[in-house]
Amino acid sequence: MSSVFNLSNPIFPTIDHRHHCFPNVKPQFAFSRSSIHLSNSRITEVRAQLTDTIPVAAKSISKDEVMKAEKQVIVGTYGRAPLVLTSGKGCKLYDIEGREYLDLTSGIAVNALGHGDPDWVKAVTDQANLLAHVSNIYYSLPQVNLAERLVASSFADRVFFSNSGTEANEAAIKFARKFQRFSHPNKTDPATEFISFSNSFHGRTIGSLALTSKEHYRTPFEPVMPGVTFLNYGDIKAAQELISSGKIAAVFVEPIQGEGGIYSATKDFLQALRVACDKSGSLLVYDEVQCGLGRTGYLWAHEAYSVTPDIMTLAKPLAGGLPIGATLVTEKVNSAINNGDHGSTFAGGPLVCAAAIAVFDKISDPRFLGSVIKKGNYLKEILEEKVGGNSHVKEIRGFGLIVGIELDVSASKLVDACRESGLLILTAGKGDVVRLVPPLIISEDELDCAVEIIYQCLHVLDEKVSN
């Protein structure tokens, strides 16, 4: 099948990868590229290319052409930054014009090993040459080997694989309800409700969406799954009271909230949830989709609190950029699940699991985790030194390499200015928090560079919006 934009086989720029803080020093490169360009007048011809080989003249592709074509063929769910990325290496990304960016987004906390990690590339390439997909009708070795690693390194006894964080949470929802029915076979109304918390984000599918606190995510799709109560994050008394009602199948909580604004739980809060759930028979579910697998400097974020859950959900960094989700459960929960209760065609395939094994084996090394803690502390120190005194900065908070800078204004102008200066960062919370989630391999020099760019761009927060 032909592609509208054949970006898989271009001759991309040979770029000078030397460290720099400001991209006004343009990299030197040789540039040539072949492509197929779509225009409205040639829709019929391009459709014919789907089944027939039609010679098309080569033409360079511009950023504007890609963005225009995207609007014609992609459903409009994304408000994208005006940037077309074509390659990456380590903590650097390169756009279609050959410009270099320091990446502190990691594909939204996904690329923990950065871009093009050689061990990850080898694992994917080797497995692709052997076997990519067989479905869960059959056994496959990489799936078992990955599950063995996750079980051996955590509280869990069993793993269910899926394809994303929201799917991992959907599985947890189903498992929690099934567990309550299994545990109370003679009860006509077993617990089916859930507790979630303010500033929470658990996904976009209908069950996980129901657990997500931001109303603007839920409202267009209501009615979502009923039976969810939102409590203030950290409110021990309210949580204890509601859990004791006997109606709660499970409590969903993020040990560190990423999308919600980089808020960390306290040990007292998680311990109170654990005790209350044990008394009532409710399950405690930790969503570590963003904060888990080394992001905090602990393999699992909850290890910092020494309070274990019944279920933990994982996704983002686990396969280093390939789609995966995982729902880890205790044997108590697993005993309620029968053949056919849940499933997935693609989940836990050989290719994605081979990639995840390569990621897990690197990140789980205690020396690697120690380096994350060290760099996380360094990042917060230099942020406090360089930007902490700015009048718009309310707080700098975080854990390891998940760090937030809360502002008293919207962070969008700062994000845009940093991008123009060669640094990619994210927002969180109500749009007033700068979210920094760099690849875990980032160097202190690169952190220095990032903070310097943020510092140099802070002045945009003082600019008034013109009418």
Image (cartoon, helix red, strand yellow):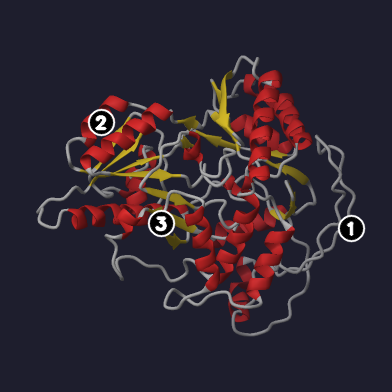
- Residue at the spot of label 2: 240
Tell me where residue 125 sits by quadrant. bottom right
- Residue at the spot of label 1: 30
Tell me where residue 70 sits by quadrant. bottom right
**SS class of the residue under badge 3?**
loop
Residue 195: x and y in percent read 29, 39
Q: Is residue 280 left or right of residue 101?
A: left
User: Distance from label 2 to label 3 (Cα)?
Assistant: 27 Å
Q: Is residue 233 visible?
A: no
- Residue at the spot of label 3: 157
Q: Residue furthest front?
A: 152
Q: Is residue 439 above or below residue 197?
A: below
Tell me where residue 61 sits by quadrant. bottom right
Q: What residue type is disc 2 on?
A: Gln
Front residue of this view, candidates 37 and 295: 295
Q: Is residue 232 above or below residue 49?
A: above
Q: Is residue 114 visible?
A: yes
- Badge 3 crowding class, 10 Å Cα cut-off, few under 14, some 14 to 19, many 20 or more, is some
Residue 136: x and y in percent read 43, 73
User: Measuring 64% from the left and 44% from the top, which residue is drawn there?
Assistant: 366
Q: Is residue 266 left or right of residue 112?
A: left
Q: What residue type is disc 3 on?
A: Asp
Front residue of this view, candidates 352 and 164: 352
Mark 1 or mark 3: which comes first in sequence?
A: 1
Mark 2 or mark 3: which comes first in sequence?
A: 3
